[in-house]
Image (cartoon, grey):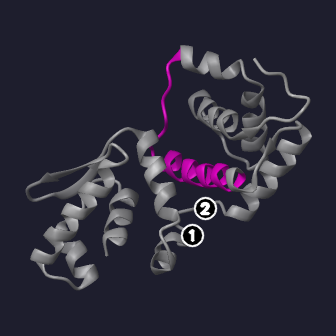
């Protein structure tokens, strides 16, 4: 139940009434209060908070990067949530398409990543597309974007996004580039700077 509530809050734009969540789960208001405490604790690991407003309900607040980290974590939450996580209205990109596009571009640019890192990159792209299309972009300062543009991975990120037919702001491209930098495996021919 905690995972379901957390995921519903992360995927909802705006407030959701506690009563609605309790009805969806067929639980009492007191049981829901206990579950909300657990969700608060779990989301605090991602620097996210639950805000409660009378007559409106609850919603999650925090930095967009933290929202994305939490959503990616909950994509792996388990079998109980497959119906929610595979809803085509939530995620328009699929893992296989992302992997094919990423592998093609990464190989063309001689960038090596492990299988787990490739999956993480693809999950990020899937979540990024969803969050951007719902009006939640990542923002970086011009200095941060300029720094990211200095990495080879910035051009690679542009190519991956192009392969996936995704339009992205320079901030979004910078975020993908920094993820690629962090997940890249160094080879024997890579220079160490």
Marks 1 and 2 in Cβ contact (< 8 Å): yes
Picture layout, residue 162 above or below residue 181: below
Q: Position of residue 168 (x, y in %)?
A: 62, 37
Left or right, 19 with reference to 121 = left
Q: Which residues are magenta?
A: 118-142
How many numbered circles does the render carry? 2
Q: Is residue 129 magenta?
A: yes
Q: Which residue is mark 2?
A: 92
Q: Residues within 10 Å of mark 1 (few under 14, many from 20)?
A: few
Q: Which residue is mark 1?
A: 88
Q: Pick whichever, 27 or 131, lies toward us.
A: 27
Which residue sits at x=66%, y=49%?
121
Q: Residues within 10 Å of mark 2 (few under 14, many from 20)?
A: few
Which residue sits at x=76%, y=43%?
160
Magenta stretch: dominant secondary structure: helix
Q: For the residue labelled by badge 1, is the local secondary structure a helix, a strand or a loop? A: loop
């Amino acid at each position: 139940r905690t995972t379901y509530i957390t995921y519903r809050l992360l995927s909802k734009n705006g407030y959701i009434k506690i009563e609605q969540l309790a009805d969806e789960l067929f639980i009492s208001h007191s049981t829901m209060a206990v579950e909300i405490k657990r969700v608060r604790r779990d989301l605090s690991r991602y620097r996210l908070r639950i805000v409660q407003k009378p007559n409106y309900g609850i919603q999650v607040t925090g930095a967009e990067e933290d929202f994305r980290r939490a959503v990616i974590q909950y994509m792996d939450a388990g079998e109980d949530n497959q119906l929610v996580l595979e809803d085509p209205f939530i995620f328009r990109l699929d893992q296989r398409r992302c992997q094919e596009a990423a592998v093609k571009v990464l190989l063309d640019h001689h960038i090596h990543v492990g299988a787990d890192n490739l999956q993480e990159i693809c999950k990020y792209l899937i979540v990024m597309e969803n969050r951007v299309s719902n009006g939640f972009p990542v923002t970086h300062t011009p200095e941060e974007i300029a720094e990211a543009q200095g990495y080879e991975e910035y051009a690679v990120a542009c190519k991956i996004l192009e392969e996936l037919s995704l339009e992205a702001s320079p901030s979004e491209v910078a975020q993908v580039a920094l993820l690629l930098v962090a997940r890249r495996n160094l080879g024997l021919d890579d220079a160490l700077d």
